[in-house]
Image (spheres, helix red, strand yellow):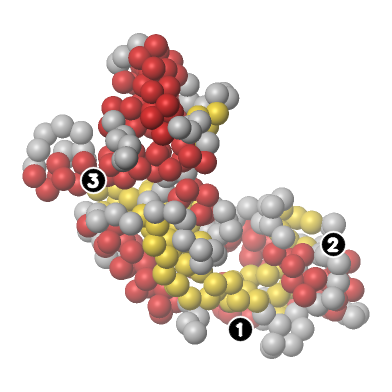
Amino acid sequence: MSVELPLDQVRTLLAVVDEGTFDAAAAALRVTPSAVSQRVKALEQRTGRVLLRRTKPVRPTESGEVLVRFARQLARLERDARGELGMSGAGAGEPTRVPVAVNADSLATWFLGALSGLPGVYVELRREDEDHTAALLREGLVMAAVTSSSQAVPGCSVRALGRMRYLPVAAPEFAADRLAGALPDALAAAPVIVFDRVDDFQDGFVRRLGGAAASALRHYVPTSEGFVDAVTAGLGWGMVPEAQARPRLREGRLVRIGGPEWWVDVPLYWQQWKLDSPALVAVAEAVIRTAGGALRQP
């Protein structure tokens, strides 16, 4: 027997997640907190699942994330339909906006070029590490994401974009002073630039060479442009996207560490909702086309 999902209950669940509390959701929906609680409880009984963690702010459970994503997709379809019909009400006259999660290095190198030919479509970019953008898709917070995962998030499709190559580089003076010895050991001892406290990319590179990890002497620089500037300034070594490293290598402001075979390729994928939205289709086509020329292809 199929289980129906009453739209008022699904929309109420979304309001609670977005607003953070039952009281705030009640104010947004212009109903009583009791009505909000009853709708959520009825939806949990109907699905046989706990959908919300009663924390502050309220967070969806794994089952709740499925319904939150469903609610956001419904809202998107409703806005698209109203726009095509020229109807008044929610979404009418508003710009078509597509929320997308993108890693910082793609944002700094190739991604923005994909958006220049999309008249009438506006994007809301959320910067997130490529290993974590899929979580935003699962929570329904974005419609699409550039991610390092080839495993599709439930309800999403996935396409390969290409490989972003990273080169281990340093300023010439830094390399001469701090990296003159056996490189695995020297890299493990020399100051290093990392993006933030969850960035283990440099550690992984040292481990690939046989070391334990990069040095504990670290500068945390949480922007892509700032990262390469910090390496160029001689604060430490780091793994820099090829597109950003090449001009500075030609100018002599950076030098490669090790031989030409020392590099790391990170595969990138485009994941998006399985949703027949013209705006989402347009963004996807532009991103895939731009990535085809900007990233290394198989």
Q: Position of residue 281 (x, y in %)?
A: 27, 61
Residue type at numbered disc 3: Leu
Q: Earlier in the sequence, mark 1 or mark 2?
A: 2
Number of other residues with Cα within 10 Å of mark 1, as a class: few under 14, some 14 to 19, many 20 or more? few
- Name the mark on residue 250: 1
Label annotation for residue 215: 2
Q: Amino acid at mark 1?
A: Arg
Q: Is residue 63 left or right of residue 211?
A: left
Q: At 86% across and 67% down in the image, what residue appears?
A: 212
Q: Quadrant of the N terminus?
A: top left
* Secondary structure type for disc 3: helix
Q: Is residue 197 above or below residue 259?
A: above
Q: Residue furthest bottom?
A: 260
Helix, strand, or loop for circle 1? helix
Q: Secondary structure at mark 2?
A: loop
The reply, left or right, for residue 12 in relation to residue 220 is left
- Earlier in the chain: of badge 3 and badge 1, it is 3
Q: Quadrant of residue 290?
A: bottom left
Vertical placement of residue 274 versus 298, above or below: above
Residue 240 left/right relative to 160: right
Q: Which mark is residue 77?
A: 3
At x 77% / y 65%, what residue is drawn? Answer: 203
Closer to the eye: label 3 or 1: 3
